[in-house]
Amino acid sequence: MSGGVFRDALGEAAEQYDVLLSHLSVIRDLTRVAQHASSFDDLCTTLAARIIAGLGYERATVLVARDRGEPIVAGSASQAGRFDGDMVAGPPILRVLAADVIAAGRLLRWSDEGVGARRPLPAGLEGTVVGWPLVVGGECIGAILCEEIVSTPWDLARQRALELVGEIVDQVVTLTEVRFSMASIQRRLEGELGTSRDLLNDQQETLRAQSDRIGSLTGALVTSNRAKNHFLGLMSHELRTPLSVILGFGTMLHDGLAGPVTPEQHGHLTRMLYNGRHLNQLIDDMLFFVDAETEQITPRWARVDLEALMREVVDSLPASAKTGGPTLSIAIAPTAAVLQTDPALLRRALFHLVGNAFKFTEHGSVQIEAIRGIDGAVEIRIIDSGIGIAAEQLRRIFELFQQGEDIHARKRDGIGLGLNLVNACLVLLRGRCRLVGRPGGGTCAELWIPDATTVRAPRTPELADAAELAASEAALVGVTHDGAEVIAVARRATADPAPRATPELPAQPKRAS
């Protein structure tokens, strides 16, 4: 090889090296663009400026055709603009060339000189125009066109270098688009999060205000309930004292201890004593209700003759309830004749249940039966042939101030307090009650009274025991269809059985009367 040919080859290699070096420098600069662009137009302008600064083109124009529309200029830079700061827009023909690049999807060159594949240079342009597609996420969205006034030699190395620059530009634009999308999503999420945070704060403030209001209402309710109980207790005591005096002097006059009375006067005194005793019983019930609600009653266990207690309850009923009313039969099984319980609480419960049986049975019969259950408890049934209780009334009949059908309640005395007091007594006795009846068919009140003398093996309160007890006694007085109350009563029944009888019981704070 001659020296001239060698020098030419060496010069050509050096020139290609310079071309590759300049393009690599441009690629390095382009990789930094994605981190700093503030918008897509800013990105396109920066790309055009870096291309003309690194590759020496006269003008670089980035055209974008979104949604297959007409290409429009998104960014442009020129050598003249680098020095004087003015932006010189390219001729309109560039839009046509950009459309050709987008359609071809590859690098194109327009020139009237040089070698290699090229297209004729359109009128109005000088030198050479090189364009390559702008691809984002696999979709060609535009083109980058570079103009040079003096055509530079074109060879395969320059073409490959420009194609590599185009691929880098595609990746830069794609990454920038992803960054813009992520920033948009972040702003939207921050906005939604801010809105959600504001809503949450508002809800928390509302809940806090409601909680404070509930707390204040609860405190006011507790205070009001205490005042109510204090008032009822005070008034009941204040009423009982003069009423006792009235009943005492009325009894003296009725029995003739203060002198003879006429038959008419005797009838008036009898009616006065009946109403006075009824009022006294109501006051006594009110006092018991207040004591039971304030947890001032503790059962006192004692040996009870059940039949004698039954007779005592029946004898204490108003005479008008028994005169000309239903027939009474009492059947106490020998095994149930005696039990250990609180006689005052049991007497009060039986008084209201037996009294209701007589009150709502004008003709027919009232039967009282008692047997000893297999678990040692005494089971008492009070069966009447009266008007009965409708099924829909059974759920609320034990509630405070509730009575049966209004048409029957208006005909008879009472304020709907008796069965609620029965409930209170049975809770203290750890007993249960269930009413079974139908309109026109009578009613059966079933009581289960535990015997304190019955020896029970210690039991562990298990969920199965509580569930069995709750299911078998779903009609528990006052807590029918209330799962939480049923389970609570069941747990108390299984965890703390009735105490055994002892030779001498300790003194209690207060005795139920």
Image (cartoon, rainbow, N blue to C red):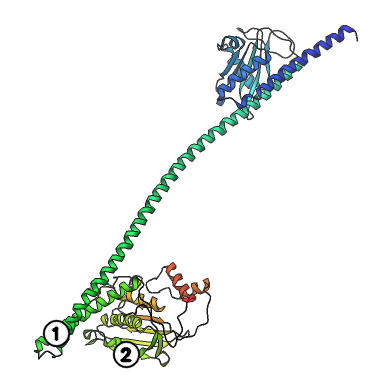
Density class for disc 1 (Cα within 10 Å; few <14, some 14-19, many ≥20) is many
Q: Quadrant of the C terminus?
A: bottom left
As shown in the figure, which amino acid type bears the numbered disc 2?
Ser
Counting from the top left corner in percent of width and height, residue 507 is at 38, 81
Q: Is residue 492 left or right of residue 40?
A: left
Counting from the top left corner in percent of width and height, residue 111 is at 68, 10
Instruction: Give the secondary structure at mark 2.
Output: strand
Q: Is residue 334 left or right of residue 188?
A: left
Q: Residue furthest bottom?
A: 334
Query: Foreground residue, 164 or 126?
Result: 164
Counting from the top left corner in percent of width and height, residue 321 is at 23, 84
Q: Is residue 325 left or right of residue 443?
A: left
Query: Foreground residue, 340 or 180?
Result: 340
Q: Residue at x 49, y 85 (%)?
A: 455
Q: Which residue is mark 2?
A: 329
Q: Which mark is residue 93?
A: none
User: Marks 1 and 2, Cα distance to the nearest angstrom?
Assistant: 31 Å
Q: Which residue is mark 1?
A: 269
As shown in the figure, which amino acid type bears the numbered disc 1?
Leu
Q: Earlier in the sequence, mark 1 or mark 2?
A: 1
Query: Foreground residue, 307 or 59?
Result: 307
Residue 390 showing in the rendered view: no
Q: Residue at x 81, y 10 (%)?
A: 11
Instruction: Give the secondary structure at mark 1.
Output: helix
Q: Residue furthest front?
A: 507
